[in-house]
Image (cartoon, rainbow, N blue to C red):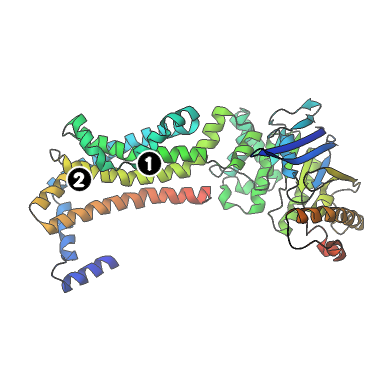
Amino acid sequence: MLAIALWETLSRVSPWIPSALEILKLVWKDLNNESFLFALAGSLRRMAIGYSFVFTLGIGTGLLLGRFRVIDDLLGTLAVALHSMPGAAWVPLSILLFGFTEAAVIFSIVLGATGIVMVHTSNGIKDVPPLILRAARTMGARGTSMFWHVIVPAAIPRIVDGLRLAWAFGWRALMAGELLISSIHGMGRLLSEVAKKQQIHELLALMVIIAAIGMAVDGLIFRRMEDTVRTRWGTA
Amino acid sequence: MSVVLENVTKKYTHNGSSLPVLEGINFSIEDGEFVCLVGPSGCGKSTLIYLIAGLEKPSSGRVLADGVQVTGPGQERVVVFQEAALFPWLTVQKNVEFGLKMLKVPQEERTARATEYLRMVHLTRFANAYPHQLSGGMKQRVAIARALAMDPKVLLMDEPFAALDAQTRRLLQLELVEIWKETKKTIFFVTHNVREATALGDKVLEISARPGRIKKGYAIHLPKPRRESDPHLIVIQQRILLSLQEEIAKVVKDEDMDYLVEKDNAVGAGDRAVGNSI
């Protein structure tokens, strides 16, 4: 609220800064516009599909990396490499593989965000406090039971961290993908359309919406999850 | 369960140099006995617990539990650690059930046994709480209930009350004595607190500074629960403290500090200081 008030005040002073109220009005108009909502729904659907892959693949391979030394030796570096690649950098390859299609956008999300989940999951598994492991061993936990009943739950805080970051990474990859693949109807295409028409206010309104969705999902889902996990597991 | 240690030594090798932690350890714990081990910090007390628990292997010598050599952890020898080491993702009830689950005990019996031991440590009301909602003393009680639920033959306790305030510690000592009387478990209890050792042990073993050796043993034939101010206890405490002063002086020299512990300080200060400053 304070930020909006400050923005509005500045816009009154300087002719170069667009009015916050005007942009909020445009945001409202967008939210009541069927074609806009259609684009938004498309983007969210692609994000949902992409993120389910990220979730499954990231945690699955992360668990394998953490559990089996051999797999970690073979693929550990690859996971780190994957996670250091920005999502946008995958878009050209995705287009080569899948053409200008929805699948290409989803592929960019998956490659842009899976690495971070993998790395966090496998690190979480490798960093379980020795005391917890000792206690579990004296109570008879071994091998598989140790892994599923002790190591995996102990790693949950790190996994949740990874999932939260992956949401942000995936959201960015989605926008990058949609900007380049303009044949599909989504937020990215709307962005490039209004930019081409030099409608700065409309562009800013879209950006506000994109940021707001990113923040809302982060705050309402991931922050809450992380807070619960933090209190229960302790920060250590 | 009887526990026997025969000529046990333990060395850690680090970067090629070997550090002797325990040397020539010989002692035994009779079935149903409550044995306390006191000694300065860093003398291998925890290592000794881990050896009996089977979490570590001796470099030489043997550890026997009911005449059988210990080769690994076993549910008849459960450890209660200084930090309760509860599983934060499980409720108190599920924490206590954990060992039974590993033993594949059916859910009904698990619930029943966990409830029984939670009652024994007076935590029935907190069965559905999570560890982070408990105080230090309560966590330690859960850890004790969790160990007891597995019906071990010997309870190995590694400074379980060291992180608690004096009142809570005293309360838990009294509860432990009750539990010991009720369950007739063999208990091996490690502490750096002389007063605690004499309040609890049928036998108090004193371990020397590194490398740890059993220096002396004291039998205490006083009924439990014992009054802390019992004059008999104070006499024993002072004897142990005097003997420990030498060990502490060694540790201090070892650690290359600027001061030496005055031999008479802790003892001369009278009852108040007894057992506190080790």
Question: How many angstroms separate mark 2 from mark 1 (CA)?
Answer: 26 Å
Q: Pick the residue in front: B138 or B109.
A: B138
Q: Is residue A24 left or right of residue B230?
A: left
Q: Position of residue B46 (x, y in %)?
A: 72, 43
What's under tag 2, amino acid-wise? Answer: Leu
**Badge 1: residue crowd in 10 Å (few <14, some 14–19, many ≥20):** many
The residue sitting at the left extreme is: A197
Q: Are marks 2 and 1 on the same chain?
A: yes
Residue that mark 1 sits on? A116
Q: How many marks?
A: 2
Picture quarter containing residue A169? top left
Residue A219 locus on image (x, y percent): 35, 52
The residue under label 1 is which amino acid type? Answer: Ile
Instruction: Please state the chain letter of the residue tagged with numbered disc 2 in the rendered image.
Output: A
Q: Secondary structure at mark 1?
A: helix
In this image, A60 relative to B75: left or right? left
The residue lying toward the viewer, choosing from A113 and B140, is A113
Task: Report the side of B180 relative to A111 (left or right).
Answer: right
Residue A71: quadrant of the picture: top left
**Residue A176 appears at what percent x and percent y?**
22, 44
Q: Kindly check if marks 2 and 1 are in contact, taking CB atoms under 8 A apart as contact.
A: no
Q: Which mark is residue A40?
A: 2
Callout 2: few (<14), some (14-19), or many (20+) C-alpha neighbours within 10 Å?
many
**Is B117 above or below relative to B227?**
above
**Label 2: which secondary element:** helix
Quick one: A233 or B67, which is closer to the camera?
B67
Of the image marks 2 and 1, the number of the one nearer the N terminus: 2
Extreme residue toward the top, this view: B68
Residue at 13 percent across and 48 percent down: it is: A192
